[in-house]
Image (cartoon, helix red, strand yellow):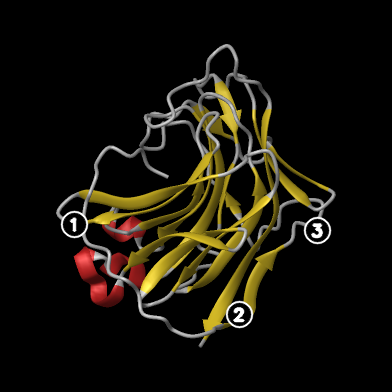
Amino acid sequence: MHSMKYIVLFLVLTLPFLGASQYNLIWSDEFDAPTLDPLHWTHDVGGWGWGNNEWQYYTPGDNLSIEDGILILEARKEQQGGNDFTSAKITSKGLFEVQYGKIEARIKYPTGQGLWPAFWMLGSNIDEVSWPQCGEIDILEHINNEWTVHGTAHWDDNGHVYYGAPLDMSPLEFHVYAIEWDAQGIRWFVDGQQFHVMDISNGINSTSEFHNSFYMILNLAVGGDWPGYPDCCTDFPAQMLVDYVRVYEMTP
């Protein structure tokens, strides 16, 4: 979930038709427990800008709750750690990693200038190789008041490059955001509709990062280089709602 400062243009080949796949559920969180499951998620805590000059301080749980099977990440206008806003960010780092598969979540996100909800993934070797060498897959990103969502991949090719696409849609309801990821490519979906595809076969265009394992992240950022910053019309508290997160193994 990094700001889009650089543009890479390259040929994306048409991916071969692989035939129907069977999806076997291998990991999920339905958020049926009253508190966050520590075997599934851990909190990212801090307010150092997170590489994008963001304005929120991620708390160790104060901005997260579960109600009626829905995970709630809440951004608030309140000071903590020298920041003017607080919010929540959780990851499966060190708890669950996946290489290839179908990864999906049912999410309703808030709108407002400076709000930046995301469901995304980072390469599990980030602590060894840093970003963007670890690779990043943004399954869902939304900014501000757009009626558009974005699916994007970031990686290293003699510097940071990315390849993404938008999909116009209503932000007012829950939608299912997913990728299908295998050794040939990454495909992005909303409610079963594919809107973006990226060829990674044989590490084409230096995409070897995407043949390693990744972990998942859910967060609600406030401000940053890409969306800009809240204004007088941004409503707080703002809530990102997550019904479930599911990971499937794909068997051709």
Mark closest to the chain's N terminus, 2 or 1: 2
- Real-space Cα separation, disc 3 to disc 2, in angstroms: 22 Å
Dot 3 or dot 2, earlier in sequence: 2
Q: Which mark is residue 157?
A: 1
Instruction: Please indicate whether residue 218 sits to the left or right of residue 49 in the image.
Output: right
Disc 3 target residue: 32
Using the numbered discs, state the Cα–Cα distance from disc 2 to disc 1 in whole angstroms: 32 Å
Horizontal relation, residue 177 to residue 126: left or right: right
Question: Quick check: 248 above or below 234?
Answer: below
Is the Cβ of the residue at disc 3 closer than 8 Å to that at disc 2? Answer: no
- Please state which amino acid type lies under the numbered disc 2: Tyr
Question: Hey, what amino acid is under mark 1?
Answer: Asp
Label 1 Cα neighbours within 10 Å, binned few <14 / some 14-19 / many ≥20: some
Placement of 215 over or under 86, stated as above or below: below
Q: Residue at x 76, y 49 (%)?
A: 70
Asked which secondary structure carries label 2, the reply is strand
Q: Earlier in the sequence, mark 1 or mark 3?
A: 3
Asked whether, in this view, residue 154 is left or right of residue 110, the answer is left
| Residue 246: percent from left, percent from top | 64, 66
Instruction: Check disc 3 and report its element: helix, strand or loop.
Output: loop
> Do the residues under discs 1 and 3 have CB atoms within 8 angstroms?
no
Name the residue beneath numbered marker 2: 23
> Label 2: few (<14), some or many (≥20) within 10 Å?
some
